Image (cartoon, helix red, strand yellow):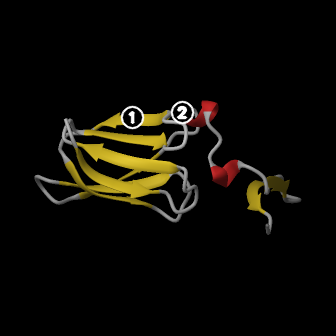
Amino acid sequence: MGISALTWCNIDPTLILSGGLDKKLVSWNYKTGEIITELEIDEIPYGLRWSSIPSVFSYTGSENSKTFIYSIDSEVLSNYAPRWIKPPVGTRFSPAGICELVKFSE
């Protein structure tokens, strides 16, 4: 049908998020053409933006100008490893048993 909005992920530049006139948001890897996620929404998106928080993005709809925030579910990412979870990333455990995601300097 057509694309109404497009944005690149600033954390993983191989990921693009596009919004279409068919009222779908699609995140995909532009190098491989692989669709990572596809989300049907209630209206045509006109503003898209990746957050500085990995896997989170927002969009603004056309009809009411409200902003909606979504997170890509880790289960959906089971077949794709975005840059923010590739090395140099690891986990550490605190003495209290809390697990944290850690990014090491490159």
Mark 1 residue type: Glu
Disc 1 packing (10 Å; few <14; some 14–19; many ≥20): some
100, above or below 82, in the image: below
* Residue lying at 14% horizontally and 53% vertically, measured from the top left: 62
Q: Mark 1 or 2 closer to N-term? A: 1
Q: Residue furthest front?
A: 31
In the image, is 49 to the left or to the right of 64?
Answer: right
Residue 76: give its label: 2
User: Horizontal and vertical percent for residue 69?
Assistant: 37, 54
Q: Residue furthest bottom?
A: 105
* Residue annotated with mark 1: 38
Callout count = 2
* Residue lying at 20% horizontally and 35% vertically, measured from the top left: 22
User: Horizontal and vertical percent for residue 24?
Assistant: 28, 38
User: Horizontal and vertical percent for residue 94?
Assistant: 85, 59
* Residue lying at 30% horizontally and 55% vertically, measured from the top left: 59
User: Horizontal and vertical percent for residue 78?
Assistant: 62, 32
C-alpha distance separating marks 1 and 2: 10 Å
Element marked by disc 1: strand
Element marked by disc 2: helix
Answer with the quarter of the image where residue 27 lies: top left
